[in-house]
C-alpha cells in the first residue's frame, strides 16, 4: 500500500447498522489513504460488521478503554494518523466517489488548510430528503462566526492544524470550535459546492435537538473568549441562518 496522504478518522458508538456503507465509501476514494475507526464503547454488532475489513492494511480499529466521547475519539484517531491530511466521517454518513481527490486538488492549488463540501440531507433510512445544503467557495473566519457552514463529515484538513487545535469541550459543538480557531490563525477555508457528502439525519443527533444545539453554539462563542453581548449577537445570526438552512 502507498504511503497514505489522507488519514480518515471515523468515531463510532453503536454504529453497526450504518457503518458498513460509511467504510465502503472511504475505500472507494481513489487516493492513498488509511482509515481509523475509533470504537467508543459500543454494545451492538459494530465489531462484527467490521470483521471483513480487519485484513485490509489500510484499516485500523481502535477500541477506547473508556468512553471518550466524540471529541476525544477523533483526537485519538488524529494522533495515530500518519497522513498529511485528516478527513472526518461519522459512521452514519457516506461520501460520493471522487470527494477526497477534488479536495486535495483545491487544497494543493490554493494552499488552504481546510476544505469543506456541500451535502445532501438524507432520511434516517438513507433515502433522499430532496434538500441540499450548499457551501461557499471561500469561507472566511468572519463568515464562520455568523454561521457554521462547515459540516464535520465533509472536512479535509491538514493534520498539523488539527494537532494544534484539537477538538475539546463536548458541551459545545467541538468541531465548530476547532474550525473557528483554525480559520482565525490560517485564513480562509475552501468550499466545493457539490453534494460530495450524504448526511444522514439521525433521530437523536445534535442537529435534531434544536434547543440543545442552540445552547452548544452559544458555548462555542464563550469558549472563543467572547463576552456575553458579542456572543448573543453572533447567536442571533446563527439562529437566523439555521431557520434558512432547513426551510
Image (cartoon, rainbow, N blue to C red):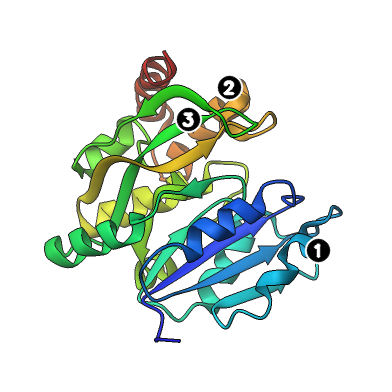
Q: Mark 3 points at which residue?
A: 121
Image position of 168 (left or right of 242): right
Residue 219 in view here? no
Spot occupied by residue 232 in the image (x, y as percentages of width and height): 41, 23
Q: Mark 2 points at which residue?
A: 210
Residue drawn at (59%, 34%) of the image = 126
Q: Is mark 3 on a helix, strand or loop?
A: strand
Q: Earlier in the sequence, mark 3 or mark 1?
A: 1
Q: Is residue 112 left or right of residue 207?
A: left
- Mark 1 vs 2: CB contact within 8 A: no
Q: Which one is in front, 125 or 142?
A: 125
Q: Residue at x 55, y 45 (%)?
A: 93
Which of pointers 1 and 2 lies earlier in the amino acid sequence? 1
Q: Along the line of sight, which residue is nearer the eye, 167 or 58? A: 58
Mark 1–mark 2 distance (CA, rounded to whole Å): 34 Å
Query: Quick one: 21 or 209, which is closer to the camera?
Result: 21
Quadrant holding the N terminus = bottom left
Q: In which quarter of the image is the C terminus?
A: top left
CA gap, disc 3 to disc 2? 16 Å
Residue 185 location, quadrant: bottom left
Secondary element at tag 2: helix
Check the image and name the residue furthest to the right. 43
Q: Is residue 68 left or right of residue 28?
A: right
Question: What's the mark number on residue 48?
Answer: 1
Name which of mark 3 and mark 2 comes first in the sequence. 3
Pointer 3: residues within 10 angstroms few (<14), some, or many (20+)? many
Q: Can you tell which mark lies on residue 113? A: none
Amino acid at each position: 500500500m502507498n504511503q497514505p496522504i489522507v488519514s480518515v478518522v471515523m468515531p463510532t458508538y453503536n454504529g453497526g447498522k450504518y457503518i458498513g456503507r460509511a467504510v465502503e465509501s472511504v475505500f472507494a476514494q481513489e487516493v492513498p489513504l488509511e482509515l481509523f475507526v475509533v470504537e467508543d464503547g459500543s454494545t451492538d454488532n459494530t465489531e462484527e460488521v467490521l470483521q471483513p475489513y480487519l485484513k485490509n492494511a489500510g484499516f485500523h480499529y481502535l477500541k477506547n478503554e473508556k468512553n471518550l466521547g466524540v471529541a476525544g475519539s477523533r483526537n485519538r484517531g488524529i494522533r495515530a494518523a500518519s497522513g498529511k491530511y485528516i478527513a472526518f466521517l461519522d459512521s452514519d454518513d457516506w461520501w460520493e466517489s471522487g470527494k477526497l481527490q477534488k479536495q486535495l486538488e483545491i487544497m494543493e492549488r490554493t494552499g488552504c488548510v481546510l476544505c469543506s463540501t456541500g451535502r445532501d440531507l438524507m432520511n434516517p433510512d438513507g433515502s433522499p430528503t430532496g434538500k441540499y445544503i450548499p457551501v461557499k467557495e471561500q469561507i472566511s473566519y468572519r463568515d464562520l462566526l455568523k454561521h457554521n457552514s462547515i459540516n464535520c463529515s465533509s472536512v479535509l484538513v491538514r493534520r498539523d492544524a488539527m494537532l494544534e487545535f484539537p477538538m475539546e469541550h463536548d458541551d459545545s459543538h467541538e468541531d465548530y470550535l476547532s474550525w473557528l480557531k483554525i480559520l482565525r490563525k490560517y485564513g480562509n477555508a475552501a468550499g466545493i459546492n457539490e453534494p460530495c457528502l450524504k448526511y444522514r439525519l439521525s433521530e437523536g443527533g445534535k442537529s435534531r435537538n434544536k434547543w440543545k444545539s442552540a445552547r452548544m453554539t452559544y458555548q462555542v462563542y464563550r469558549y472563543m473568549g467572547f463576552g456575553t453581548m458579542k456572543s448573543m449577537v453572533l447567536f442571533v445570526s446563527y439562529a437566523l441562518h439555521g431557520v434558512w438552512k432547513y426551510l
